[in-house]
Amino acid sequence: MSTLHPFDQAMTLHAVTANAWRGETSDGYMHVVGPFGGFIAGVMLRAIINEPARRGDPVALTVNYCGAVEKGPFEIATKLQRGGKYNQHWSMTLVQAGDTKVSATAVFAIRDNVFSHQPATAPVAPAPEAVAAIAKFGLSWLDRYEYREIEGKLDVMSGPHDPIKPASSLSWIKDEPDRPLDYVSLASISDCALGRLVLVRGTMPIFGTVSLTTYFHATATEIAELGVLPVLVSAAAKRFHANFHDHDVQIWGKDGALIASGSQIVWYKE
Amino acid sequence: MSTLHPFDQAMTLHAVTANAWRGETSDGYMHVVGPFGGFIAGVMLRAIINEPARRGDPVALTVNYCGAVEKGPFEIATKLQRGGKYNQHWSMTLVQAGDTKVSATAVFAIRDNVFSHQPATAPVAPAPEAVAAIAKFGLSWLDRYEYREIEGKLDVMSGPHDPIKPASSLSWIKDEPDRPLDYVSLASISDCALGRLVLVRGTMPIFGTVSLTTYFHATATEIAELGVLPVLVSAAAKRFHANFHDHDVQIWGKDGALIASGSQIVWYKE
């Protein structure tokens, strides 16, 4: 019996040949059909972290969801596009039965203690322990996170919203069960803020992320210091138009430091 | 003598073989060393727009600046990673003398008239004609745009800022001379907001964009309707830390519609 945390089990990759990794979808991190987008983001980043030629820590990750990943095994091919003195640029593809299902790029870098300044201020939020955790949903990936919703609560039970509601949300989120935060779990958490269409319209329309970009602001040491604490996740959409909407996210530590930020673009049918 | 607009001259690509395009850096769109990042973003998108297999319009573009592009010719290789009913996923690399200098991904899609809603509000700004255009700088790419700065004015003449200044800016921007807006010029304009470090610190430190992501919200028809009007560009940085800072941008039409939005992550030395 494995003593690995479910997330670490899910993120396990085995070397096939140079620059090729084999993984498998995880029953613990499935969405309605196919794996949770955060699982995919995490595993694409994990492949590079595993690479012997990798230097430094993640700075940027873009994941393009090209086609439906099916339950079962997959292979991730990695390519070091260029490695400089400070920065590395990687490209990755996830393939199932010869079909490219995911393409991605990542920037890694050696980071140092230079000019530091945070113009952005973390949203005002009650302490996590003052906010009730939402009940489990029975949707496997969602149940692998503890959500303490402050604003923009998920509400699909009261029917379509009329008028529509705000596109922003604020929640404390952490792995369930507890797991120390790292870059891979942050990549996954960057896709944890719930669907903006659901918040706004109160319905469960057909939608799917087509591209997700995450920037990592905190160093590995700073992330390790956060331990198993929940992170404060603020998210919003600026425009829903012509089948696509954006969805930005900011991930804050308990001390108000911005740990990661990013955005995704989401396709919706109607 | 060409009658093409300087931007269209700069964006000209010639087919080499299937999925390979040849272009050249443009003296009109150079930064201090190498081409303006917006030129690169534009030309990477142009390559896909030129592809016979391309369907639909751009939705997302991520450009990774892997290495210094040198003055002269380059080749862009394109690959259709996957084409679905509504969406296409492309990957691109820009190569000079066998070295990958840029990697990129793009999502194209067939877009339709479905649910539309813009939660974000355009910043309040005076009309473009009420704001003075900044003087030409003698930096070639900068002189190819007309900037009417409202907030976050460029100021490197008064020495280092003490205290440091805000990381946000607001400007009306358009091509110089006039050129009707399209997706390619929008991709370039998404890199037009000036360096956040310069705004904040009032110095000209060593820095460079490593990755840029742009989402296109407006349809081709809506963009065509904007014609040669300037667009309102708001930009800000949330955190400068450990050699990298983010830099988000929103591009608004004169009617307040959000045309495009995105972000970049920028390396800085000290």
Image: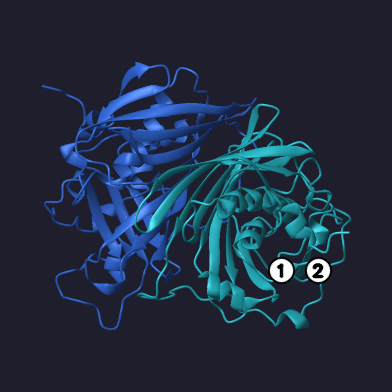
Chain colours: A blue, B cyan
Q: What is the C-alpha distance between the residues marked 2 and 1? A: 12 Å
State which quadrant residue A74 falls in.
Answer: top left
Residue designated by label 1: B173
State which quadrant residue A226 falls in.
Answer: top left
In the figure, is residue B161 to the left or right of A125? right
Above or below B202: residue A216: above
Q: In the image, which disc is placed on residue B177?
A: 2
Q: Chain ID for label 1?
A: B
User: Which part of the image, by quadrant, shows the C terminus of chain A?
Assistant: bottom left
Give the image location of residue B158, x and y in percent: 86, 56
User: What residue is shown at x 15% (from left), y 51% (from top)?
Assistant: A139
Element on which disc 1 rests: strand
User: What residue is shown at x 77% (from left), y 53% (from top)?
Assistant: B202
Give the image location of residue A94, x and y in percent: 35, 35
User: Which of A116 and B124 lies nearest the eye of the viewer?
Assistant: B124
Q: Residues within 10 Å of mark 2 (few under 14, many from 20)?
A: few
